[in-house]
Image: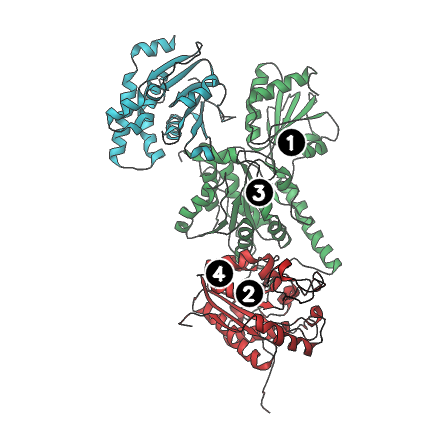
Amino acid sequence: MSRTLMKGNEALARAAIRGGCTHFFGYPITPQNEIPEYFARELPKAGGLFLQAESEIAAVNMLYGSAAAGAQAMTSSSSPGLALMQEGISMLAATEIPCVIVNVMRGGPGLGTIQPAQSDYFQMTRGGGNGDYRILSLAPATVQESAEMMEESFALAQKYRTPVFLVSDGLLGQMMEPVQFDRHTKKKRAGNKRWILTGHHHRRPPRTIKSLRLDPAKLESHNLELQDKYGRISRRETRFELYRMNDAELVFCAFGSTARIVKNSIDDLRQKGCRAGLIRPQTLWPFPVQPFKTLPESGKAVICVEMNCGQMVDDVRLAVEGRMPVHFYGRCGGVIPEPAELSEYALELLTGGAA
Amino acid sequence: MSVIFKKTTGLTEAATHYCPGCTHGIAHRLVGEALEELGLLGDTIGCASVGCSIFSYNYFNVDMIECSHGRAPAVATGIKRTVPDKTVFTYQGDGDLAAIGTAEIVHAAHRGENITVIFINNAIYGMTGGQMAPTTLPGQKATTAPAGRIAEFSGRPLKMSEMLAEVPGAAYVERVSLHHPKYIRKAKKAILKGFTCQLAKGGFAMVELLSTCPTGWGLDPVEAMEWLEANMIPYYPLGVLKTPEEV
Amino acid sequence: MQNERILCAGFGGQGVMSLGKLIACAAMLDGREVTWMPSYGPEMRGGTAYCSVVVADRPVGSPIVTTNATSLIVMNLPSLDRFEQSVVPGGLILLNRSLIDREVGREDVVVHALEATTMAAQCGDPRAANMIMLGAYMALRGTPRHRHVEEAFSLVFGSGSSTSFNLNRKALRCGFDSVSAEAVIRKAA
């Protein structure tokens, strides 16, 4: 099939419909508006439903109701909107509702900016809602990968009965890149439907979807079941890409749009004789610890590059476990790092200039 | 021997946790009876909200979902838009519907969501221990209004039914009371109408039930019924605020 | 084929976004790797609008071209003021003389100026100035090719009226032909 030049946001929406999305609930916020606009145009044609909510809070609760009634439902938003959804996301995790939530990140804190950032790494990996829960967070770096991960996210949500985050950003959402939609069509998974609300038809006892468990023993056992599931997800779904890592002395770690910029810098550094490589987490949670446990012998230092003030670097340090120094280079507020400044920073570091 | 009364199959066998004299039990029974009489028990999905009635999912003999505080109308929207042939209702108190959930209830009405809202107004937060609600009457004592509600400081109580009746998308809005058998019979009719409105695809329907909270009010059950009649009804007049002609 | 980092800038409504999309789409149809990245936000509503296009043989890393542009296609004066220094030495600045009444200050870049708005008006609609610019760019750079651009028309604009297709093609040709063989040689040198 031929390649189509598409905006990341539109590719996400198209891929979601291909992945089986039937219901979309959302509230406008820049820079993700092409997603609800695409669904408003295209989802009814595919037999689905698009509904604009009065707030992100309402949207995530509509998502909850819709998925509880058996829909393959999703919402999308951007950073401040995700903050508003956190209560609902905690609820979705507690009640184990399969659904997909897209975050096209922008700079914060507060209203921040509408320009690209990765300052929601914490929000996407540490929750933000209350309680012990984890959300599988997929982090694409290209429009093609956005489409593939989006399409697959519904199957993952069903497989584990869990909400799934698709973590994009203003750069990845707004840029156009060629995308091919039939490259990675995965088998769709129906999932176990014995929990959804259908009405009991006088054939079974009434069914309840709930999170409140006032008996400590019951809530503890529910939590342990959830933790078991998170363990399964960690073991099976952790993903990462290695780029020019074999003989790397400088190991970059970056995700999403930053990773593509870092790749440019690595190519540049290699031309200058500096052996650089990249570990790119494709899942933010579960975080890929394994490649940091098997860093090449040639490795001298790790540089974590993010479009924020240092969030993923915490996970990198935990994964490196002190085996080598971990440095952080970040730009934030909507400023996008240039490959040249990364190369400069790396070279300075190697010659002992940078801290 | 003929049976002159039996418990509705709209409720489960579970004993409720509600306080003596609380009218939640009456409201539950009326909703259960209405769903049973309309033959809807097997095709209904209920939305329980945060407040004393959070546990209503243990009592209604229908599929139920627990909702975050105030969000039941949004959850109900998601359900109804996914399975429009099911009967969907929310059961919400005045803290849930009239305080934290005002946006969700107004916009569910605004969109004309074809759902039925059972709104329990007892002028206080019951579950958390008697704090002031948006519906607490001027002068009425609450744990967070120890000297009684001061209207100049906290505002005058919200009249949700009057407000929602003004929303173009609302089809049917009625306020009834549960303090006396005569009024309970009227309440039953209103609840039935709330569900038949949904069956006729009439749009948003809400029945406000003036209710008692003897524990929160610091009264015994009989005093509570009397207090409701003497104080709540004058401020919250009973009657139909909006009705579709065809229902 | 060399890699290109193109910055298209003008004010909202001049079609700089479409201009960039056409270059990216045509290059994609030619089998190249491409990205297109817009400026977005309040700027969309009237102020300076610009987009970055990268054309390469390998998957593109950074899609941002606000520095180290190999070509700047600039439609109005504020955009030239803002981006003149963004072009690499030896790069190309293609400017719309109709709306830019000053000379480019730099001497280390190739400058090509044309009365794009006036020429577009002569073709039938001053709004086709972006197509005049694209035509000139194609002549100066030798890429993208006409057939890829014409195929890109329908992909970028949708299947619009034949009137607008014909206008676009006419303006494209007019811009292309306006570039003398001499200019192409000068640029190559």
Contact (CB < 8 A) between labels 3 and 1?
A: no
The local secondary structure at tag 1 comes to loop
C123 left or right of A3 in image: left
Contact (CB < 8 A) between labels 3 and 2?
A: no
The chain shown in red is which?
B
Image vertical order of residue B167 relative to residue C110, above or below: below
Q: Nearer the viewer, residue A65 or B211?
A: B211
Q: Nearer the viewer, mark 4 or mark 2?
A: 2
Say which mark, if any, is on residue B116: none
The chain shown in green is which?
A
Image vertical order of residue C42 relative to residue B52, above or below: above
Chain on which label 4 sits: B
C23 left or right of A171 in image: left
Q: Residue A169 in the image: x percent, y percent?
A: 54, 36
According to the picture, the residue beneath numbered tag 4 turns out to be B109
Asked if marks 4 and 3 fall on the same chain, the answer is: no
- Classify mark 4: residues with Cα within 10 Å, few (<14), some (14-19) or many (20+): many
Image vertical order of residue C136 relative to residue B191, above or below: above
Q: What shade has chain C been given?
A: cyan
Q: Residue A146 in the image: x percent, y percent?
A: 51, 37
According to the picture, the residue beneath numbered tag 3 turns out to be A80
According to the picture, the residue beneath numbered tag 1 turns out to be A309
Looking at the image, how many numbered discs can be counted on the residues? 4
Chain on which label 1 sits: A
